[in-house]
Image (cartoon, rainbow, N blue to C red):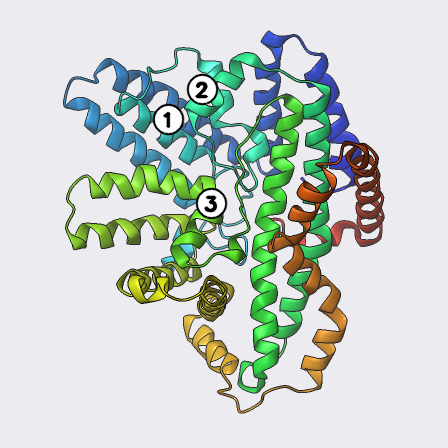
């Protein structure tokens, strides 16, 4: 979803065909587009699409028809097993390309397969069938509607994860107007700016720090590097989420917001609620609550937290680093629960600062493939190498200061507050400034894409 061909060919062509098409044709066109995007990345991805759609539709019908019989539970378990297998086999981490088989030490034939949407479609299929099993709504008889919901291509890259009861009414309406199209264009340009100017730059900064031997890494450089990695992850995922929401808005769909300034959280539980909100709600509804229903003892709560956090981390990639980071998150959440009373007595700014420091402390487990190397990195962060700063630290600060400051202002909500409270509340300023900054972002992104070229796609898969 990033590139000149996307911006100047795919997006205008798709929008024109979709907006001019009669209503019965729109859903089929979206489905064909989804299949085309998957096939363009790797034809093997069509297997994932077919399995998720067919299992969701067929098992949804079977579960509904046998809802009063014990066999419905067996059917649901089989549906979940199939889609989890698809997720673990075809989805891979964006950092090192590992999948489940490579984590287990086996050579994987699927490692080179670029399966677009393999992290999203299984969750859509499972969520739909679980809701049918819980009698939240009747199963959908129209195959095309389930197919479009499960394989809704705007959310392939980074969500948001959709709920069928949220998506279904909008599917029947397909209402598009000038306001939604304008909103979609703004979200797309904002997402591209976040990806090209902040996420890519933060990745370069992290690569510069990683080029230094951990044994000789100064503490200041270590903190700068891990902060850059934190910004890279946030702006990478939120950028693609914004682009997906923008495409959906052009189509007339209103998708839920996935990120709510997570780095302003005052606790790890608050961070989980704000970082990729739709993924958090999915894990809470279909994993956490399913385990809690079996018992309210402490062991069930611990198991519910462990499985929910592990599932959320593995959603970003089936690698050992995801498992290590998930375990570190569980430890922090449990410690936070035990110290809940004294922590609440602290002023909120202190709690936010404490959370940020602790999050950056455990983030090397996600950033580095080897957990022992992550421990060495954490040691360097806290002065274990007996080096506070050096000339490299000075170079990093002077080179990347403006980009880091921009990342802090955007992720901290300063820009969002300024635009919403000071500009968008003023109709005159809103009418003038909105088109201006959208055009400015278009020019900046175009010039960047022209100058960078194909190397941009190094980190997209």
Q: In the picture provided, is 21 more to the left or to the right than 76?
A: right
Q: Are marks 2 and 1 in contact (CB under 8 Å)?
A: yes
**Residue nearer the viewer, 311 or 176:** 176
Q: CA distance from mark 3 to mark 1?
A: 20 Å
Q: In the picture provided, is 171 more to the left or to the right than 396?
A: left
Percent position of residue 119, x then y: 47, 41
Which label sits in the foreground, 3 or 1? Answer: 1
* Neighbour tally class for label 2: few under 14, some 14-19, many 20 plus, Cα within 10 Å: many
**Residue nearer the viewer, 80 or 129:** 129
Percent position of residue 307, x then y: 30, 50
Q: CA distance from mark 3 to mark 2?
A: 22 Å
Q: Are marks 3 and 2 in contact (CB under 8 Å)?
A: no
Q: Which mark is residue 146?
A: 2
Percent position of residue 369, x then y: 47, 66
Earlier sequence position, callout 3 versus callout 2: 3
Q: Determine the residue positioned at 53% across, 85% down.
A: 215
Say what secondary structure mark 2 lies in. Answer: helix
Whether residue 128 appears in this view of the structure is yes
Q: Determine the residue positioned at 47% across, 50% down.
A: 316
Say what secondary structure mark 1 lies in. Answer: helix
Which label sits in the foreground, 3 or 2? Answer: 2
From what the image shows, is residue 223 above or below residue 283? Answer: below
Numbered circles on residues, count: 3
Earlier sequence position, callout 3 versus callout 1: 3
- Residue labelled with disc 3: 91
**Residue nearer the viewer, 49 or 259:** 259
Q: Determine the residue positioned at 75% across, 50% down.
A: 454
Q: Which mark is residue 128?
A: 1
Q: CA distance from mark 2 to mark 1?
A: 9 Å
From what the image shows, is residue 260 above or below residue 321? Answer: above
When asked about the image quadrant of residue 400, the answer is: bottom right
């Amino acid at each position: 979803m990033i590139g000149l061909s996307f911006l100047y060919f795919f997006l205008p062509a798709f929008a024109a065909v979709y907006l001019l098409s009669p209503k019965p044709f729109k859903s089929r066109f979206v489905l064909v587009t989804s299949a085309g995007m998957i096939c363009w990345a790797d034809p093997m991805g069509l297997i994932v699409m077919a399995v998720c759609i067919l299992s969701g539709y067929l098992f949804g019908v079977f579960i509904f028809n046998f809802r009063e019989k014990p066999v419905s539970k067996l059917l649901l378990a089989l549906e979940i097993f199939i889609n989890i297998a698809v997720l673990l086999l075809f989805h891979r981490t964006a950092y090192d390309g590992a999948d489940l088989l490579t984590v287990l030490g086996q050579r994987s034939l699927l490692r080179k397969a670029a399966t677009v949407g393999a992290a999203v479609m299984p969750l859509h299929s499972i969520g739909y069938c679980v809701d049918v099993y819980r009698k939240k709504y009747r199963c959908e008889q129209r195959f095309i509607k389930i197919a479009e919901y499960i394989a809704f291509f705007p959310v392939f890259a980074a969500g948001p994860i959709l709920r069928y009861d949220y998506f279904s009414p909008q599917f029947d309406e397909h209402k598009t107007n000038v306001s939604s199209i304008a909103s979609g264009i703004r979200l797309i340009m904002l997402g591209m700016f976040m990806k090209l100017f902040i996420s890519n730059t933060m990745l370069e900064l992290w690569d510069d720090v990683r080029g230094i031997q951990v044994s000789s890494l100064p503490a200041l450089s270590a903190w700068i590097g891990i902060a850059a990695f934190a910004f890279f992850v946030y702006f990478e995922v939120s950028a693609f989420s914004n682009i997906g929401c923008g495409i959906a808005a052009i189509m007339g769909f209103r998708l839920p917001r996935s990120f709510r300034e997570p780095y302003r959280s005052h606790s790890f539980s608050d961070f989980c609620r704000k970082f990729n909100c739709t993924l958090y709600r999915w894990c809470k509804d279909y994993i956490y609550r399913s385990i809690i229903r079996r018992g309210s003892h402490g062991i069930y709560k611990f198991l519910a937290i462990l499985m929910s956090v592990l599932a959320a981390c593995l959603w970003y990639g089936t690698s050992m680093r995801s498992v290590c980071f998930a375990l570190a998150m569980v430890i922090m959440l449990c410690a936070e629960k035990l110290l809940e009373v004294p922590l609440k007595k602290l002023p909120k700014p202190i709690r936010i600062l404490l959370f940020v420091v602790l999050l950056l402390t455990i983030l090397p487990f996600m950033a580095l493939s080897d957990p022992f190397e992550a421990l060495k990195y954490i040691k360097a962060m806290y002065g274990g190498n007996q080096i506070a700063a050096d000339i490299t630290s000075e170079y990093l600060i002077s080179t990347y200061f403006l980009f880091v400051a921009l990342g802090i202002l955007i992720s901290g909500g300063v820009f969002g507050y300024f635009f919403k409270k000071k500009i968008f509340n003023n109709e005159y300023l809103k009418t003038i400034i909105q088109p201006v900054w959208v055009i400015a972002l278009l020019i900046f992104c175009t010039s960047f894409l022209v100058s960078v070229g194909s190397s941009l796609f190094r980190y997209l898969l």
